[in-house]
């Protein structure tokens, strides 16, 4: 399964970000805690060079906490400041503005010593589609400022948002990169909802996800659906899930399309458990 998705508005967004980067002091990159490697846009590092950097491990409530610990340590070892966030209930959100202020402390003090009043700290918030930027911003400001949605690509234009006095955010649309060199990166992005569902064969995606889970979390399917998938091929597992759920079409045939949709939705909602598809190993790079 080879997934590629880079619609025209993303090219426009990248150009806009390149033009606006000089306006900000800090770049805040949201990544999905379930896929910290796959959801980290390699273009951001070039865009944000010479800027203070913060990584937000969002949706940490859906990810394997032990793996999130490892990823946080990996990013911090590379010099990033890291915050773990659940933007739905607000956990970790209050730590973001103080962290950005702390990162700018030396510059603030230097300006103050020269008798200059520093303008508000400005941060650009970036990330892949559907990673939760708009939900996070709404939590930060305490009201609905940014449009949110479950589909990738809801935010289409930039907007400045005042979070607190002295701290402003530049919201940007979700952006991917032109080509996924590793097909598994595309699959993980699709599985977590970062790629438009309308372009995906959901049955094929479900089978790829089942294959990944069999290696990484071999008990996940059994714990959720009550049967062991051992020695079964991915499509056989999908059919069995449909049988267990009673999803039938005319002629008493298992409705694998409906099954695939439910399976993917349940994975995204962590009903199969808190799962991280990207593992940290000694060889695991952070940049693609």
Image: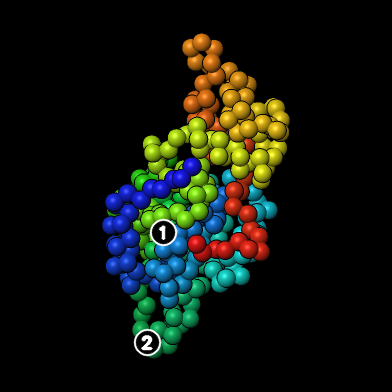
Viewer-nearest of discs 2 and 1: 1
Q: Position of residue 2 (x, y in %)?
A: 46, 45
Residue 246 in sight in this render? yes
Name the residue at the bottom extreme. 114
On screen, residue 63 versus residue 45, left or right, reads right
Residue occupying the point 29% across, 51% down: 8
Pointer 1 residue = 126
Residue under label 2, please give it: 115
Q: Residues within 10 Å of mark 2 (few under 14, many from 20)?
A: few
Give the label on residue 174, or none: none
Which residue does the image show at 54% across and 67% down from the upper left?
A: 81
Q: Is 82 or 169 nearer to us in this picture?
A: 82
Label 2 – label 1 distance at C-alpha: 33 Å
Residue 255, image x, y percentages: 51, 21
Left or right relative to 224: residue 196? left
Q: Is residue 239 left or right of residue 202?
A: right
* Mark 1 nearby-residue class (10 Å; few <14, some 14–19, many ≥20): many
Residue 139's x, y, as percent?
45, 51
Vertical placement of 143 versus 234: above or below?
A: below
Looking at this view, name the residue that lies furthest to the top.
251
Q: Position of residue 38 (x, y in %)?
A: 51, 54
Q: Secondary structure at mark 1?
A: strand
Asked whether the viewer can see residue 222, the reply is no
Identify which residue is drawn at 38% across, 53% down.
174
Among the two numbered marks 2 and 1 on one chain, the one whose residue lies closer to the N terminus: 2
Q: How many marks?
A: 2
Mark 2 residue element? loop
- Seen at 55% across and 51% down, the residue is 35
Q: Specify how the rendered protein is coloured.
A: rainbow
């Amino acid at each position: 399964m080879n997934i590629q998705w880079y619609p025209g508005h993303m090219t426009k967004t990248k150009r806009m970000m390149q033009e606006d980067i000089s306006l900000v002091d800090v770049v805040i990159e949201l990544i999905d805690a379930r896929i910290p490697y796959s959801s980290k846009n390699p273009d951001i590092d070039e865009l944000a060079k010479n800027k203070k950097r913060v990584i937000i491990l969002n949706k940490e409530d859906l990810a394997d906490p032990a793996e999130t610990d490892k990823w946080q340590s990996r990013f911090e070892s590379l010099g990033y400041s890291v915050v773990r966030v659940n933007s739905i209930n607000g956990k970790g959100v209050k730590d973001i503005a103080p962290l950005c202020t702390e990162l700018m402390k030396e510059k603030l003090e230097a300006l103050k010593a020269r008798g200059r009043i520093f303008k508000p700290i400005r941060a650009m918030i970036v990330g892949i589609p559907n990673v939760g930027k708009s939900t996070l911003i709404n939590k930060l400001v305490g009201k609905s400022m940014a449009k949110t949605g479950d589909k990738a690509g809801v935010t289409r234009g930039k907007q400045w948002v005042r979070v607190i006095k002295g701290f402003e955010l530049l919201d940007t649309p979700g952006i991917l990169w032109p080509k996924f060199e590793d097909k598994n990166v595309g699959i993980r992005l699709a599985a977590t909802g970062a790629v438009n569902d309308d372009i995906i064969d959901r049955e094929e995606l479900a089978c790829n996800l089942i294959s990944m889970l069999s290696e990484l979390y071999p008990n996940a399917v059994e714990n959720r659906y009550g049967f062991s998938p051992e020695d079964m091929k991915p499509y056989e597992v999908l059919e069995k899930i449909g049988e267990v759920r009673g999803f039938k079409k005319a002629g008493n045939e298992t409705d694998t399309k409906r099954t695939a949709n439910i399976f993917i939705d349940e994975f995204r909602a962590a009903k199969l458990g808190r799962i991280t598809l990207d593992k940290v190993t000694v060889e695991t790079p952070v940049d693609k």
